[in-house]
Image: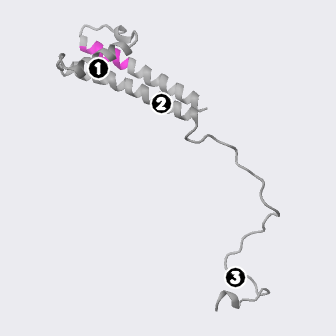
Amino acid sequence: MSYHDYRRDDPPQGYQAGPQPPGPYSYEPPARRRPGDGASVVARVVVGLTCVVAVIFGLHVLFSFADANQGNGFVQFIYGLARVLVLGFGDVFTPDDAKIGLVLNYGLAALIYLAIGQFVAKMLRR
């Protein structure tokens, strides 16, 4: 039996939807920010930059522990950049062992950068 063989006065078969409200819907969902909004893009850039700074601090600590070649240009660049970006956190802790102090100070600086970056990004996304 095909679809056209049914008469209109036959009872409907299959799944029946409930009663439909009259007229078209006039509800529009509230506008929300799309991923391409300016604030979202700036927030992602802020988080990305703070992550790059944290990686630079990590490389500085790694190169110090591994006794990297001080004459290498990349190692010199990372050391110089880390010293500039540490912003006063380079001597917060002064233990007897210089390497422990390096880990503590640059680790603290990295954590502060990451926390401030996440906070700024969260405020931008609001």
- Please indicate whether residue 103 sits to the left or right of residue 124 in the image: left
Residue depicted at x 25% and y 7%: 96
Query: Tag on residue 30?
Result: none
Secondary structure at numbered mark 3: loop
N-term mark: 3 or 2: 3
Secondary structure at numbered mark 1: helix
- Which image quarter holds the C terminus? top right
Local crowd size for mark 2, using a 10 Å CA cut-off: few (<14), some (14–19), many (≥20): some
Task: Residue type at mark 3: give it.
Answer: Gln
Name of the residue lying farthest toward the front? 73
Tell me the CA gap for discs 3 and 2: 57 Å
Q: Residue 20 lies in what quarter of the image?
A: bottom right
Task: Residue type at mark 2: give it.
Answer: Val
Residue depicted at x 46% and y 29%: 47
Q: Which residue is mark 3?
A: 13
Residue depicted at x 52% and y 25%: 119
Residue 104 appearing in the image:
no
Instruction: Please name the predominant secondary structure of the magenta segment in the image.
Output: helix
Q: Which residue is mark 1?
A: 78
Tell me the CA gap for discs 1 and 2: 21 Å
Query: Tag on residue 45?
Result: 2
- Indicate whether 44 appears above or below 64: below
Q: Which residues are magenta?
A: 99-108
